[in-house]
Amino acid sequence: MDKFIAMYVYLYDNFLNNKKYASVLKAMEIRLTDYGIAGKILHLNNYVDVKPIIDDEIKRGAKTVVIVGNDKTFGHILSRGSTCDCVFGFLPIGNENTVAEVLGVPTGLEAVNALARRRKEKLDVGWFNNRYFVSQLRIPPAKVRVVYDEKFQVSTTYKMEVVVCNFQPFYWKKNKKDAVQQVVHPQDGKLEAFLRPLTKKGWWGADFEEPSIFPFEEMEIVADSPFIVEADGRSTKEVKVKIRLAKNKITMIVGRNRKF
Amino acid sequence: MIFKKNETQEEYVAEEDTVMEDNSQSSGEDNIDTVVGPSMIVEGDFASEGNIVVKGTVTGSVCTSKNLTVEEGAKILANVKAGSANVSGEVQGNMRVKDYLELSSTARIIGDIEVRTIAVQAGALLFGKVAMPGMEKSETKSAKNLKGRNRKEMTEE
């Protein structure tokens, strides 16, 4: 029987303090207690480094760390905590939950059922310049060139936006007037890079071209002048970025309808 | 209740096993196509495990085991190896296509082609040799037959 005893720690995002989420949280907590998987609840601040917190809880006997929040919470916690030796779960609440869709975890109360099933998967994460990213890495339009797997180079005469997706799907529209939003769901085992040149339209206008898509395992983004890199909600300035896939880095509880 | 819990836990363990199996089967294949946009320039050995769609310019070499689509306005200045290909743009280089090659009316190819099956629409431009593996065999057989007949005729005379 001891084999199945797992201590759970729930990391709540700051935005869940809002009153409108109180009823959902309460219902979730009741269901978690019903399933016998209720545990310690920790409320996070926006600027807290979660790694020492998770490490501390693991030392105290925690086996499963459950992220409660949205895409931002997921990225914020796993970008730091992916090296921790524990199983991660996710209870998505509110809007902006595209990662949950990829993982097959339903939003709200139903997510507790997926968590209770404990369908575990080893997932890959992205790695760049000594940091991990789980959802998405974005470089706003800049004069950059991309070298893939040290084999071929991709460039353009225009400035281009680079988006590298790990768990978060990539959404774009063919043009500004287009009502239909195009979606590409990332697959596990590779990272997907979406390159969109910002081409000139008319005298002053500029518009994004249809994206170029390259699935890859390793790539290097190089530029002559520094460019901004946004990964999991944090932005830095770099001149050279090496992006790689770290395979089977995190163990995650996923849902039946996952997209990989 | 305790027995019930045990049962459910066993079910979950079984589910986990099946998930791992599924994962091993699905890995290794690309579901997402590699797309080279209209204003993109690719230089080097461009290789992909999945389908490739070229709308821009590629120089160096192109290699895929699956389908290659060269759209109208696209330019490939490279030797091409592909499982199958649909060409509507320009290719300057030799093409080795394993199965099926389709040249649409806007296609321009400068280079030799080696392919099993080819379909050429009216208006397509092609400057180079076309070799088909099925033809080689029958040609060599007929040549051998001819040579054999000639020898027989010579000896009879």
Image: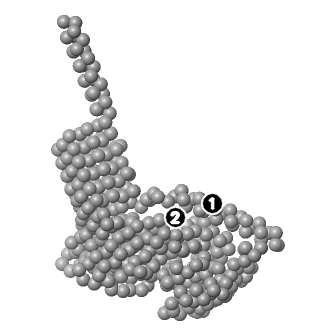
- Tags 2 and 1 on a common chain: no
Q: Quadrant of residue A127?
A: bottom left
Dot 2, crowdedness within 10 Å: few (<14), some or many (≥20)? Answer: some
Please give the chain letter of the residue carrying mark 1.
Answer: B
In the image, is A244 to the left or to the right of B129?
right
Q: How many marks?
A: 2
- Dot 2 falls on a residue whose secondary structure is loop
- Residue at point 69% right, 78% down? A6
Quarter of the image that includes the C terminus of chain B: top left
What is the x, y in percent for residue A55?
Answer: 58, 86
Quarter of the image that includes the N terminus of chain B: bottom right
What residue is disc 1 on? Answer: B18
Q: Amino acid at mark 2?
A: Phe
What residue is disc 2 on? Answer: A260
What is the x, y in percent for residue A212?
Answer: 33, 66
Q: Relative to the observer, which residue lies in front, A4 or A71?
A: A4
